[in-house]
Amino acid sequence: MSRPAGLHADVAEVLLTEEEIGAKVRELGARISTDYAGRRLTLVSVLKGSLPFMADLMRSIDIPVRIDLMEVSSYGGATTESSGLVRILKDLSASIVNEDVLIVEDIIDTGLTLNYLIRYLRGKAPASLRICTLLDKPARRLVEIKVDYVGFTIPDQFVVGYGLDYGELYRNLRYVGVLRPEVYSGTPEA
């Protein structure tokens, strides 16, 4: 496991800078504001990774918004692969019946967790249900998911930062970076 003091050293390359992320979040916020003009929107953050993105996104939206938080898990500890088994660790705290709902995700890769979440939330009878993700990794997609708002499409690399973690570390990086493979593969550094 990485040393906390070496967080930046564990990143092989910066994929998206803080400035690029900020500009994209403002662009997404403007689009969402236009699309939902005259309506109230409920943002549902999928904890923990999407929390920084949702915090910045909601400040970039110019319409009335409510926020709610869910925590789901399909990963087991310090792993890079989804287990496929989805568990709801924290459910919504308010009803979304007849509400316009936007799921806010940090990253979509296989789509398995999000597919489960969409079906689950549709069962709560929202007026509309759409998806916004900062990062889309289509090379790993196992189920078809319609994503309404995409920040960046990225290659099939293991990324951390801006909420994304490995072993609960790296979430506090202000950029999105590619984690050095030796950090998560267990092989010694060259």
Image (spheres, rainbow, N blue to C red):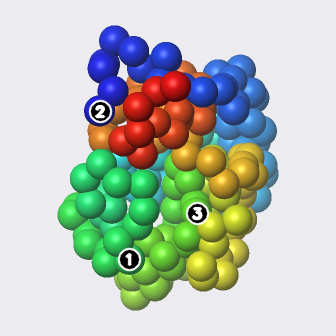
Query: Residue tagged by mark 2?
Result: 1
Nearer mark to the viewer, of 2 and 1: 2
Q: Secondary structure at mark 2?
A: loop
Q: Is residue 93 left or right of residue 29?
A: left
Residue 87: quadrant of the picture: bottom left
Residue 168 % position (x, y): 30, 38
How many C-alpha atoms fall within 10 Å of the one at disc 2: few (<14), some, or many (≥20)? Answer: few
Residue 72 % position (x, y): 32, 64
Q: Residue at x 69, y 75 (%)?
A: 146
Nearer mark to the viewer, of 2 and 3: 2
Q: Residue at x 41, y 31 (%)?
A: 188
Picture quarter with the N terminus: top left
As shown in the figure, which amino acid type bears the numbered disc 1? Gly
Query: Residue tagged by mark 3?
Result: 109
Of mark 2 and mark 1, the one earlier in the sequence is 2
As shown in the figure, which amino acid type bears the numbered disc 2? Met
Q: Residue at x 59, y 79 (%)?
A: 142
Residue 122 seen anywhere in this rendered image of the structure: yes
Query: Residue tagged by mark 1?
Result: 84
Q: Secondary structure at mark 1?
A: loop
Q: Is residue 70 left or right of residue 149?
A: left
Disc 2 to disc 3, how far (Cα)?
23 Å
Residue 67 % position (x, y): 41, 50
Extreme-top residue of the structure: 5
Which of these two is toward me, 4 or 74?
4
Query: Looking at the image, is 79 positioned above or below residue 2?
Result: below
Of mark 3 and mark 1, the one earlier in the sequence is 1
Residue 117 seen anywhere in this rendered image of the structure: no
Q: Is residue 64 left or right of residue 123?
A: right
